[in-house]
Amino acid sequence: MSDVASVIHDIGYQRYEGPRLGRRYVFGSLYVHGLRTAFGLGRSAKAKIFPWFVLGVVFLTGLVLAAIRAQVGDEVGVTYTGFADMMAWLVVFFVAVVAPELVSRDLRAGVLPLYFSRPLHRNDYVYAKLAALATAVWLLLGAPQLLMFAIAAFSADKVGDVWTELGDLLPGLAYAVLWAAVFAGIGLLVASLTGKRAFAAGGIVAVFLMTTPVVGVLSVMPSQTVNDLALLFSPSSLVFGVGIWLFESGADGDGDSIGSFGPLYLAVAVGLVAGCIALLLARYRKVASS
């Protein structure tokens, strides 16, 4: 709640007499600003190059897959959930660029005390930034799926095919939420550790790159149980494992198996997101008190 007894002056030291919009407005403004920053909106052309390049690639891929499906049917073998799996590494690089833009600049510029002197609570800052990054990742994966659905719906022979297509789309959008939550949580946590964007971006990519070989080694061990648990040891493959269990994503692909450990994969994914949020809150508690 704002302190109505305080006095606000603008940069020209003129007394502000307008309304005080409070914590919810500040949270919403920070979220919208973060989402715009993710796609370079309101910034220089240079800041738009990478996010819009990634958007172009995923939309072009979705368009091509939808066109092929319209011609040859499901023989193309790529579902909506499978599309999210295909874009996993693009999402990693997208998060590696966007997450430091959202938080590392504030750390380096030392503006957080200014933020926290307003009605905005430090936890609100974390939730707004996390929500902005997760929304950006979800749009990156979900919007091309909506395009694929629209093409499939307009090329359907009967209304029943549209409903079938919609039934396939909804799991794909839900799967994109899981990708967004896991990748945004990890990306923002790593980015919050340094004010240098290059180090933050490298750290995010390293988390995903360095864990992938562990999955490869465990997946070829002689024990079937170890093979089934191998996908737990990398964020990307962890989400992929949840997709196999919930949506049969990639079930007819490269033969990855999770056995009967589907609930464990989901529990680890949820725990990973919760852990990242808890560590982010602890990180900004320390920043606010320093």
Image (cartoon, helix red, strand yellow):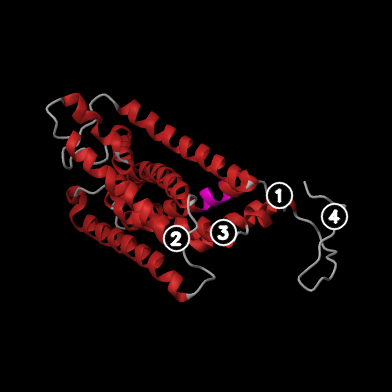
Residue type beneath disc 1? Arg
| Residue 113, quarter of picture | bottom right
Label 1 or label 2, whichever lies nearer to me, is 2
Circle 1 sits in a helix, a strand or a loop, which is it? helix
Q: Specify few, some or many for label 1: CA neighbours under 10 Å numbering under 14, 14-19, or 20 or more.
A: some
**Circle 3 is placed at which residue position?**
106
**Which residue is painted at 60% across and 59% down in the image?**
110
Label 3 or label 1, whichever lies nearer to me, is 3
Circle 3 sits in a helix, a strand or a loop, which is it? helix
**Circle 2 is placed at which residue position?**
197
**Circle 1 is placed at which residue position?**
23
N-terminal of the pair, mark 1 or mark 4, is: 4
Give percent across and percent down for residue 175. 37, 42
Q: Nearer the viewer, residue 259 or 110?
A: 110
N-terminal of the pair, mark 3 or mark 4, is: 4
- Whole-number angstrom distance, CA of label 3 to CA of label 4: 25 Å
Q: Is residue 150 left or right of residue 71?
A: right
Q: Specify few, some or many for label 3: CA neighbours under 10 Å numbering under 14, 14-19, or 20 or more.
A: some
| Residues under numbered marks 4 and 2 in contact, where contact means CB atoms less than 8 Å apart | no
Residue type beneath disc 4? Ser
- Whole-number angstrom distance, CA of label 3 to CA of label 2: 11 Å
Magenta-drawn segment:
127-132
| Residues under numbered marks 3 and 1 in contact, where contact means CB atoms less than 8 Å apart | no
